[in-house]
Amino acid sequence: MRQFMDITKALADETRVRILLCLRRKPLCVCQIVELCGLAPSTTSKHMTILKQAGLVDFVKRGRWVYYSLPGDDAPALVHETIAWVRQSLARNKTAVQDARTLKAILDEPPEELCKRQMARCC
Amino acid sequence: MRQFMDITKALADETRVRILLCLRRKPLCVCQIVELCGLAPSTTSKHMTILKQAGLVDFVKRGRWVYYSLPGDDAPALVHETIAWVRQSLARNKTAVQDARTLKAILDEPPEELCKRQMARCC
DNA sequence: GACATAATTCGTTATCTGGCGAATTATGGA
DNA sequence: TCCATAATTCGCCAGATAACGAATTATGTC
């Protein structure tokens, strides 16, 4: 039950659902996710921790960069079924479609530029 | 997105998930649900309102009694898929199994007795 | 109509959650 | 070694949520 409730609580926030959907195609680094959801890096990081705790995402560190992705085939069936359910439920959702467009633009820009812009915004 | 988030928020509470699972076999009246989850009638009623708002349950009034049930075939596919997902995810869950046992005992007793006991408890 | 009672609504309280900025950690480059 | 910087953790605040008991609503019975 614990694991299931971790998952439902993780999904009970729109930002986290949007992030999950955006990881569909490829791993994203934190600065890209920050750009996507328009929140402070600290807040975004917290969301990623909650998703990780629920087992809904994985991450790898590459130097100073952290890449989050959907979990691999070795993850529990529950996790895969959950992601499938979310994806199916929101397949034609307006917000999700818009996010996919935004993501495309973000991926066109080198991550370093994103980070610099985010730094400039708050300091 | 609104409807989906209503559903995930409804599922982000263990009591509500347990109630949903217990409705599997047959409709239950509020006093039975109160007995099952061990909370105050007012609290339980609020939970039922949230589940109803999310579309995850229906209810019918029979005189002074209100019976909650899983929604019928005319409910949106999203609702049925959600319930299927929850059921599958917790099929062998310990809490769910225990609740099923408790429910069996509750169904053996006439609802009137339950209501009287609940009344005695708080007044 | 008056009363009993199943359920809900209301008002209050304690806890949880999501948000931010500041401080900290950890890594690559000068 | 020292600095720059990507990310996280910490400390705080505002708003949401779950719990209760009291009051209210609605329905059946006398």
Image: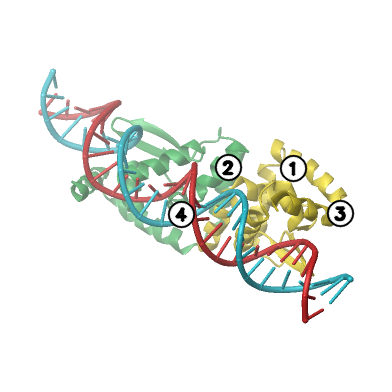
Chain colours: A yellow, B green, C cyan, D red
Tell me: A116 left or right of B25. right
Same chain letter for marks 4 and 3 = no
Nearer the observer, D23 or D8: D8
Please tell me whether mark 2 sits on a helix, a strand or a loop. Answer: helix
Q: What residue would you read off at disc 2?
A: B5
Tell me: C17 left or right of D22. right
Whichever of callouts 3 and 1 sits on the residue coming sooner in the sequence is 1
Indicate the position of residue A30 as horizontal and vertical percent values: 73, 58
Label 2 environment density (alpha carbons within 10 Å; few <14, some 14–19, many ≥20): some
Whichever of callouts 2 and 4 sits on the residue coming sooner in the sequence is 2
**Cβ–Cβ below 8 Å for labels 1 and 4?**
no
- Look at label 4 and name its amino acid: Glu
Same chain letter for marks 2 and 1 = no
Please tell me whether mark 3 sits on a helix, a strand or a loop. Answer: loop
Q: What residue would you read off at disc 4?
A: B14
Q: Which residue is depicted at the point 72% across and 41% down?
A: A96
Q: CA distance from mark 1 to mark 4?
A: 31 Å
Q: Nearer the viewer, mark 4 or mark 3?
A: 3
Q: Nearer the viewer, mark 2 or mark 4?
A: 2
Question: Circle 4 marks a residue in which chain?
Answer: B
The disc at residue A99 is 1
Nearer the observer, C5 or A59: A59
The disc at residue A110 is 3
